[in-house]
Image: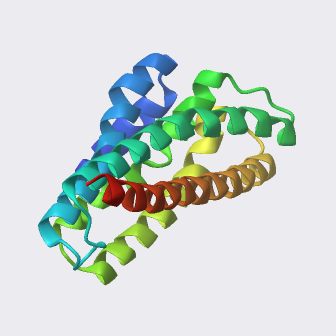
Amino acid sequence: MTQLRLHSGIWETFTSSRTSVLMMFLFYAVPLSVIPPVMIYYAGVTYGGNLLPALTSMQLQAIGIVFFIAELVMTFLVASIIKSLGDVVDIKPEFEDAYKLAVVVPTPLWIAPVFLFIPSFIFNLTIGAAALILSGILIFRNVPAILKVNEEGHAILLSGSILAAGMVAWVAMMYLTFLSWSFITSTLVLLI
């Protein structure tokens, strides 16, 4: 129980701290954004065509770079959307707070690819679904604290709006990744 309170206290300190967007980007978003492309590369090289489609090392690197850039760009895009969604409940959140929420919420999604060490598609699909659910919980838990929404109804409305926008952003990022995956695999095959 004490350990749970310690982790909760650390999380509360982070979410209530005044940290610049640059610091959050460099020391939170960038390091966590490295995990998914590196793990996809690892799984692609290690398991060949068993877990992921068989791709060359160069194709995996190119897809990883596109995915990494998409993740980082998406943090700023989602932060802008969160800032705009403040109008739904008549608040004007600072961009710094919107960005903090945009990088805190996808933490489970950034960490979930670590489980690609286990070469099971079903297991990793389950972990991915759990990460999505946990990210949704983080939205509802952190919107009142980070964006300073005091009324419960407004917090729920804003959280739901942010959840919907985040899901659209996540789907768009996955679509961009699969589109680049298709382009890279067809183009790099011709170059090799």
Q: Position of residue 45 (x, y in %)?
A: 16, 62
Q: How many marks?
A: 0
Identified at 40% across, 68% down, the residue is 128
Residue 191 visible from this viewpoint:
yes
For the residue pair 10 and 169, the one nearer the viewer reads as 169
Q: Position of residue 15 (x, y in %)?
A: 48, 33
Drawn side of residue 8 relative to residue 41, left or right: right
Drawn side of residue 47 relative to residue 84, left or right: left
Identified at 46% across, 62% down, the residue is 182
Residue 34 figure quarter: top left
By what rule are the colours in the image chosen? rainbow
Residue 127 figure quarter: bottom left
* Looking at the image, residue 170 lies above or below residue 24: below
For the C terminus, the image quarter is bottom left
For the residue pair 103 and 2, the one nearer the viewer reads as 103
Identified at 37% across, 61% down, the residue is 185
Seen from this angle, which residue lies furthest bottom? 122
For the N terminus, the image quarter is bottom left
Residue 19 visible from this viewpoint:
no
For the residue pair 55 and 139, the one nearer the viewer reads as 55
* Looking at the image, residue 161 lies above or below residue 142: below
Q: Position of residue 82 (x, y in %)?
A: 69, 38
Identified at 37% across, 44% down, the residue is 8
* Looking at the image, residue 156 lies above or below residue 79: below
* Looking at the image, residue 38 lies above or below residue 131: above
Q: Position of residue 20 (x, y in %)?
A: 49, 16
